[in-house]
Amino acid sequence: MKFFEEIRIGDVTELGRYTFDADNNKAFARRFDPQRFHVDEEEAARSHFGALCASGWHTASVWMRLLADVYRQEAEAARARGAPIVARGPGLGFRELKWLKPVYAGDTIDYRVEVIETRVSNSRPESGLVSSLATGTNQNGERVISFISTIFVQRWPETP
């Protein structure tokens, strides 16, 4: 885990991949985004998508889960080495959220984040702000989701 001062613009973290399937897509959509092209295959076939597709919120939620898993793994590794666990968060939200292509059943999305901006926080001088471009890319190399996320990251502790 990196302290704020160790983070560089251009740093990339590969979060992992996820394969969407029709049952999962429909289950998520029935609960959180029950639009016809997410929950009914016949209706989806008649929609502008042409087939059942995952909710954009589903694609964003998978990104969040994979990011949380990476943070947990990094914390466990730091703990095992006896290294400090860097405090991250809270997040300040998303901006420029774009769902660029539909995600269909069977699509596998690779998620990543790339640091695009850093600055020391004015309101919390013990933290820095890190903005990252989050993306998901399908098996055909097509970007399906992108957004900018900003979070607080702990700065190196003061030494007496």
Image (cartoon, grey):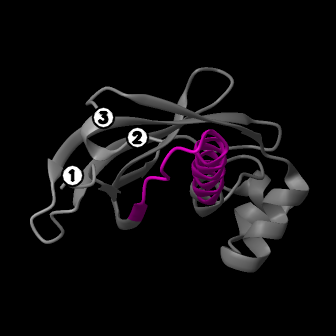
Q: Which residue is mark 3?
A: 6
Residue 59 percent coordinates (x, y): 62, 52
**Spatial distance from mark 1 to mark 3, Cα to Cα?**
17 Å
Q: Quadrant of residue 46?
A: bottom right
Q: Is residue 76 magenta?
A: yes
Circle 1 Cα neighbour tier, 10 Å, few/some/many (<14 / 14–19 / ≥20)? few
For residue 93, side relative to residue 138 (left or right): left
Contact check, label 2 and label 3, Cβ < 8 Å: yes
Residue 76 percent coordinates (x, y): 66, 48
Q: Which residue is mark 1?
A: 159
Q: Amino acid at mark 2?
A: Lys
Q: Quadrant of residue 108?
A: top right
Q: Quadrant of residue 19?
A: top right
**Spatial distance from mark 1 to mark 2, Cα to Cα?**
17 Å
Q: Is residue 103 above or below residue 55?
A: above
Earlier along the polypeptide chain: callout 1 or callout 2? 2
Identity of the residue drawn at 37% across and 28% down: 11
Identity of the residue drawn at 84% across and 68% down: 27
Residue 116 percent coordinates (x, y): 26, 36
Circle 3 Cα neighbour tier, 10 Å, few/some/many (<14 / 14–19 / ≥20)? few
Q: Amino acid at mark 3?
A: Glu
Earlier along the polypeptide chain: callout 1 or callout 3? 3
Element assignment for label 2: loop
Range of residues picked out in magenta: 61-89
Q: Which residue is mark 2?
A: 2
Disc 1 or disc 3, which is closer to the eye? 1
For residue 60, side relative to residue 25 (left or right): left
